[in-house]
Image (cartoon, rainbow, N blue to C red):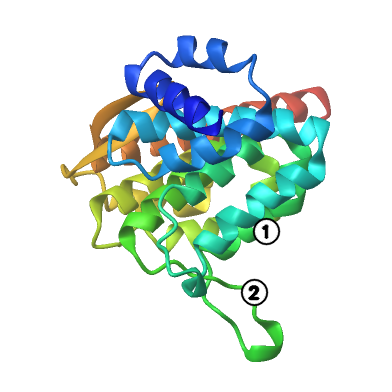
Amino acid sequence: MNRKIKKEVLSLLAAGDLGKTRERLQGFDEQGLVNPLFSALYRPEEMLRWHTVTIFGEVLARLADRDMEAARIVMRRYLWSLNDESGGIGWGAPEAMAEAMYNHDGICVEYLHMLISYMRPDGPLEHQDGNYLELPELQRGLLWGVGRLAEKRRELLLEKGVVPDLESYLDSGDPSVRGLSARALGLLQAPETESGLHTLENDERRVRLYQDGKVHVVTVADLAMEALVRISFVKLSNGAVKEEATLLNP
């Protein structure tokens, strides 16, 4: 039965129709989907992997509603895959973790600090809280994940103080890392990062961005300019609100 489920899940994901895949998998037991989805997460096909991230996040949220401890076990598998002692690389783990946190409040509350820790180096021994990911390929997934969460959990991320962490990636040697950090900062509407974002305005290196079920090819400059527009809009809106308040309460 497990082989049959795995084959069907991979077939659905490979077909590339996210809506159909989502609909067909609604009737499956969430626990029974965990291992097939882990297998799909490590596949080389780009769209198959990204659709797995989306589906896995939704499946894990449903599992958490039914059995939170079972969902914790899955999250711990992601964490273990990113541990040097696991012997693996952890491909797809940051993205899948973030998607689960996007979809479920309880998972987010328990595991957001771990996702953030992958942007932070270890501190002094008695205050270690960092698990910095060195590989740019893993950093891309991490920064995509933080950006994904910023779409829905902006205030919580700001409360956790992630802006300086993200800003440090703006001068990365990897264009995707630069672009995805810029995107996340724009979604967080962080005005203190404008000067760093301006340095990327002429960066025409290409980035592959997964959004709304599709992969879009954009440039680092596109993502930086989008971030600057978001920040400018918020600044203008805040200025208008303050001006109105002053007029009402001179």
The vertical placement of 161 against 54, above or below, is: below
Q: Amino acid at mark 2?
A: Asp
Q: Quadrant of residue 31?
A: top right
Disc 1/disc 2 C-alpha distance (Å): 9 Å
Count how many numbered circles sit on residues in the image: 2
Q: Amino acid at mark 1?
A: His
- Residue found 65% across the figure and 14% down from its top: 27
- Residue found 47% across the figure and 40% down from its top: 186
- Residue found 68% across the figure and 25% down from its top: 29
Q: Quadrant of residue 126?
A: bottom right
Q: Is residue 115 left or right of residue 176?
A: right
Is label 1 in a helix, a strand or a loop? helix
Residue contact at pointers 1 and 2, CB within 8 angstroms: yes
- Residue found 65% across the figure and 56% down from its top: 76
> x and y percent of residue 70 in the render?
75, 44
Residue placed under numbered mark 1 in the picture: 113
- Between 204 and 75, the one lying in front of the other is 75
Residue placed under numbered mark 2 in the picture: 129
Q: Earlier in the sequence, mark 1 or mark 2?
A: 1
> x and y percent of residue 209 in the render?
33, 34
Q: Quadrant of the C terminus?
A: top right
> x and y percent of residue 17 in the render?
39, 13
- Between 74 and 127, the one lying in front of the other is 74
> x and y percent of residue 167 in the render?
44, 58
Is label 2 in a helix, a strand or a loop? loop
Residue that protrudes farthest toward the front in the picture: 1
Q: Is residue 151 visible?
A: yes
The vertical placement of 62 against 225, above or below, is: above
Q: Label 2 crowding class (10 Å Cα cut-off): few <14, some 14-19, many 20+?
A: some
Q: Quadrant of the N terminus?
A: top right
The vertical placement of 50 against 195, above or below, is: above
Q: Label 1 crowding class (10 Å Cα cut-off): few <14, some 14-19, many 20+?
A: some
